[in-house]
Amino acid sequence: MTTTFYDHWRDVPEGTWRWPNFSPAEIACRGTGKLLINEPALDKLQALRDRLGKPLVVRSAYRSPEHNRAVGGATRSKHMDGAAFDIAMSNQDPVVFEAAARTVGFLGFGFYPRSGFIHVDLGPSRQWGDRFPVRATAFAEELPPAREVLAQSRTIKGGGAAGVATLGAAGVEVAQSVLADTQAAVLPLVPYLDTLRWVFIAVALGGVAVTIYARLDDWKRGQR
């Protein structure tokens, strides 16, 4: 068995950790910060993570002997060998998790439905505790947070309308200034341009209102 011990997980040399979905801090003793790297066990943990395709929340991994005593662990707990992991079921289907863990080579299983985790270790082959109740429905597929389709975005539409209208109002004001200095024949157009400028301003304010509403609505629905 290939193992390496560190007085603290921060002592792990940079570039030597090879389990991409876990960190030394996750695997280290929660009470002391000490770390025993059990390579075969971590290889199986990474294989389990790869097989399930979703994060594994590690509640407990390596335990120093003193911390194991403090938490009431078994006197020969596999946690002290770095060969056991307690994994939360908050984001897992326990049935699927157990099957995957057995497939990658874990042999020991402890079921703790009241505490919400399953213990897995390298063996010997055994199990204890009552399995989790079978869920009526499986976990829904994990999807990224909903987002509006870009072409249909109320935020973009509102912001775009406000921007265009603001530029339009500014352009009308410039046109008014220019026409005011021209021949008298075009002076009757100036009042109409003034009306047009106010129309643009109204559209701009409406666009701002739409943008604010869209943002607030998205925030309420947790989409931003």
Image (spheres, rainbow, N blue to C red):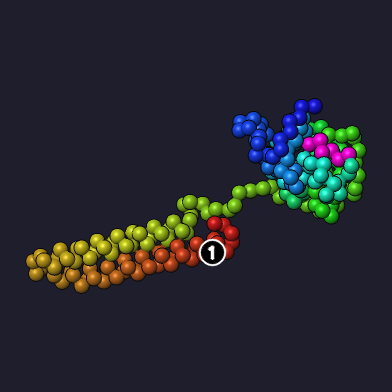
Residue 177 visible, this orientation: yes
Q: Residues within 10 Å of mark 1 (few under 14, many from 20)?
A: few
Residue 37: image location, x then y, percent: 74, 34
Residue 9: image location, x then y, percent: 68, 39
| In the image, farthest residue toward the left | 183
- Of the residues shown, which amino acid type is indicated by label 1? Asp
User: What residue did someone put label 1 on?
Assistant: 217
Image side of residue 224 versus residue 45, left or right: left
Image side of residue 45 versus residue 153, left or right: right
Dot 1 falls on a residue whose secondary structure is helix
Residue 85 visible, this orientation: no
Q: Residue at coordinates 67% horizontally, 48% vertically from top-left?
A: 142
The N terminus: image quadrant: top right
Residue 191: image location, x then y, percent: 20, 72
Write the start and end of the magenta stretch as one range.
76-82
Q: Residue at coordinates 74% horizontally, 33% vertically from top-left?
A: 5
| In the image, farthest residue toward the top | 1
